[in-house]
Image (cartoon, rainbow, N blue to C red):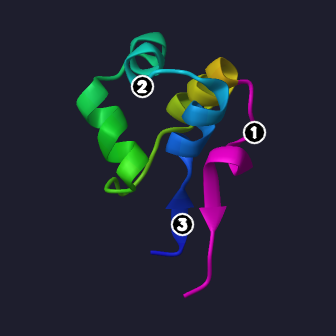
């Protein structure tokens, strides 16, 4: 898939734990793990907004596009 998820990098750079982010944005740690691994087919804009707000980043900081 040409969309890559760099959420784990953003978390590490900011020294934020996955469980803290999951609790703040209101999703389970399991769902956050699926999102981090790129195993989801989509993400709601409200979830993306909450992630970016908490991490103080832009969507492009956690999502990328790479042609195959």
Neighbourhood count class around disc 2 (C-alpha, 10 Å): few under 14, some 14–19, many 20 upward: some
Q: Which residue is label 2 attached to?
A: 18
Q: Earlier in the sequence, mark 2 or mark 3?
A: 3
Q: Which residue is drawn at 65% across and 26% down?
A: 14
Residue range corresponding to the magenta coloring: 56-68
Q: Which of marks 2 and 3 is in front?
A: 2
Vertical comparison of 53 with 38: above or below: above
Circles 3 and 1, Cβ within 8 Å, touching? The answer is: no
Q: How far apart are marks 3 and 1 (CA)?
A: 16 Å
Q: Position of residue 57 (x, y in %)?
A: 74, 33
At which x and y percent is residue 33?
A: 32, 39
Q: Measured along the vertical axis of the image, is residue 18 above or below residue 1?
A: above
Q: How far apart are marks 2 and 1 (CA)?
A: 18 Å
Q: In this figure, which residue is indicated by the disc labeled 3?
A: 3
Badge 1 density bin: few <14, some 14–19, many ≥20, Cα 10 Å: few
Examine the structure image and report whether residue 61 is included in the region drawn in magenta.
yes
The residue pinned by badge 1 equals 58
- On screen, residue 43 versus residue 13, left or right, reads left
């Amino acid at each position: 898939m040409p969309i890559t998820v760099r959420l784990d990098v953003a978390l590490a750079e900011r020294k934020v734990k996955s469980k803290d982010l999951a609790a703040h944005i209101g999703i389970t740690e399991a769902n956050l793990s699926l999102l981090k691994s790129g195993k989801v087919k989509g993400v709601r804009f409200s979830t993306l907004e909450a992630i970016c707000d908490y991490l103080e980043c832009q969507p492009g900081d956690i999502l990328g596009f790479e042609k195959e």
